Image (cartoon, grey):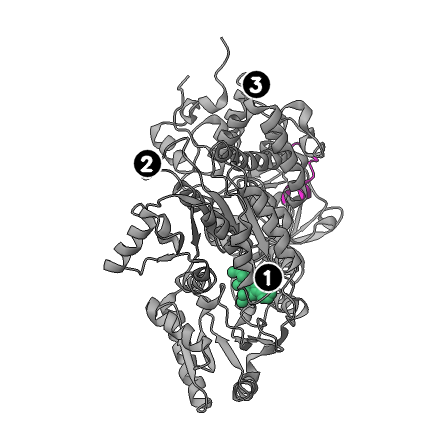
Amino acid sequence: MTAASLDKLSVETLSGIGPALATKLKKLGLYSLQDLLFHLPLRYIDRTQITPIGGIQPMTEVVIEGEVRASDVVFGRRRSLVCRLQDHSGVATIRFFHFNRAQQERLKPGTKLRCFGEVRRGKSGVELYHPEYQYLDTPNPTELEETLTPIYPATEGITQTRIRDFCGQALKRLNDHPVAELLPADISGGLEHQLSYSLVDALHLLHNPPPGTALNLLAEGEHPAQQRLAAEELIAHNLSLLRLRKKVQLQQAPLLTEDKGARNKFLEQLAFDLTGAQQKVAAEINADISTAVPMLRLVQGDVGSGKTVVAAMAAVQAIANGKQAALMAPTEILADQHRINFEQWLRPLGIRVAFLTGKVKGKAREMQLLAIADGTAQMVIGTHALFQETVEFHDLGLSIIDEQHRFGVHQRLALRNKGFSPEGPRLNGPAPHQLIMTATPIPRTLAMSAYADLDCSVIDELPPGRTPVETVVLSNLRRNDIIERVRLSCTQGRQAYWVCTLIEESDVLEAQAAEVTASELQLMLPGLKIGLIHGRLKPREKLEMMEAFKSGEINLLVATTVIEVGVDVPNASLMIIENAERLGLSQLHQLRGRVGRGSQNSHCVLLYSPPISGNGSARLKIMRETTDGFKIAEKDLELRGPGEVLGTRQTGDMQLHIADLQRDAHMLPEIKNLAENLLLNHADTVDGLIDRWLGHSEQYAQA
Ligand code: ADP
Ligand code: MG
């Protein structure tokens, strides 16, 4: 009989864990012994060796031994007991703010001590505050630790000592109960270094690092044992997306053959010619949708590169083949803007556009729903209202998601499922082709892991005649000069945005701040027509305000970041962003992309309130130096991490335990290759890997 593997053994099989504790552990996601083994220390402390006092460095944790040379109560801001501890190499101060008389007497000169604690730089050289200590002049002083001491993620109601004990017990079980090695031996590819450790060796090392293990590597997450697990985790994530992709691609999609007539008619009535990059991407899409394998394609392009028109071409192709196309946008404003564009582009082709957002209600909603269900609406535009249960498509052939990083994988899937028949999912039913457009560029390696299920096209060229936005960074103290500049610009017939930002993500406060700013600006600029737009307005009010701005009725639009995405008013050529230091680079880039859409020179003023942090000032400097969204995305990744670059929803899908998309970015291209290789040549390991890292089974044997 083979022993049950550790993922099948409940934590309750350990001594010291009963039902109550098991429940607590479950709350932490720790069900099985394997879960405990994958519950890795956050950091380690080194109590295996004694450091000579002369060699200790601030900001490190050390064990020192020496003799107390002086011991005094010092009366400063706080009373403290200060001892001087000396060994052959130097002297350090140890300081206690809480102490009793007995302690004070025992710590007299001549006493020999071993102390453990963090070294700080104090008034009189190096100091340890409240170190753990023990007397060495006792009969049997305790031995030094033999391995580095792991510190586990804080766990409510469970002490470090206990969790260390449980992990230790689980490790012992590893000797006779296996944790399956799921990565085949022959696949290391370019990851020989990471995969040099076996899973079991890596787990042993990480829970029990032997003395001499490079603590600095461990602290950075760059020890090969950590990298071994990180690589496996990333492979598992990649596989889950690839498996999804494979599943989708087993479905049948409608063949959308190219209709040259419709395409030419569409192109002829555009006011411009497509750029080379747009043509290239349109051709890639065409190649995808003219086969029966569902397209899964991501279109990346910088702000203003003209993604919408490429999407519209795909929609025309779907409709020419008798199918419906749907376009989903993340906000009402953006959805409405798409509606206006698509109506203008598609009406000449006799295509009917339906519009559905949460705000379309009553009779109007019923009419839209009916037109979508009976197929009279060939093009459907809306917000996430489109994937509510009540929406039934007649025959959806193409779904387009704009500004994708605001939607997660699951929302993407929901719209994809709309291709199934209205009676419910039909397994072999037609699946719509899917096109996804990002709002801002995503660094290549990040896209590779977060969108491993998608093919990627890049529109890497802006329409001609655009002049890059000139950006200046100014202190708030110059606000009055800026207001004067706005006055000048607007009296010359230009239009401007004034963007208010708040730290708190609160609609209410943000709206209030914008209102205050608008009235203040109106007082100072009595000659200008000033509009105000924020998230608290009714959708219709928002749209009317945007229309008034677009038509030039309003000179200056005071706005919150609701205008961040997609808004297109070519005559607006000046943007002021207040407290710009609070925003991420991608968001600033997105906002700035609202200007520079016409042919005149555009300017963006980033106002900050001093004092500004080093990081904040570095961010603003990048904005001043470049308008290239791909470069900005790389920097944003460096400065703020993947969560901010991908958006929170998307990261919700990418909960990583051990890997770190930024730290481990260098592995990602190879991870992608390995995952593809596994799916192709070692399909039997795929489910296990995904389950280990992304699944949470709750069934465990008690054996
Ligand atoms: P984004 O890629 O940011 O979504 P849009 O699709 O909104 O950009 O396009 C930005 C603007 O550029 C729109 O006003 C659009 O009509 C215009 N545009 C798109 N393609 C071209 C082109 N080839 N030449 C000139 N203008 C274009
Ligand atoms: Mg857009």
140 w.r.t. 481: above or below: above
Report the magenta residues as a range.
Answer: 210-219
Q: Residue at x 51, y 79 (%)?
A: 496
Q: Quadrant of residue 685?
A: top right
Callout 2: few (<14), some (14-19), or many (20+) C-alpha neighbours within 10 Å? few
Disc 2 versus disc 1: distance between alpha carbons? Answer: 38 Å
Query: Of callouts 3 and 2, which one flags the residue occurring earlier in the amino acid sequence?
Result: 3
Element under disc 3: loop
CB within 8 Å, label 2 to label 1:
no
Disc 3 versus disc 2: distance between alpha carbons? Answer: 49 Å
Give amino acid for label 2: Gly
Percent coordinates x, y for residue 222 in the rendering: 66, 41
* Labels 1, 3: front one: 1
Percent coordinates x, y for residue 375 in the rendering: 35, 48
Name the outermost residue toward the bottom. 527
Quadrant position of the C terminus in the picture: top left
Query: Label for residue 175?
Result: 3
Q: Which residue is mark 2?
A: 424
Q: Residue at x 52, y 72 (%)?
A: 579
Q: Is residue 37 magenta?
A: no
Q: Is residue 218 left or right of residue 645?
A: right
Q: Which residue is mark 1?
A: 305
Name the outermost residue toward the right. 89
Give amino acid for label 3: Asn
Closer to us: 164 or 129: 164
Q: Is residue 213 left or right of residue 372?
A: right
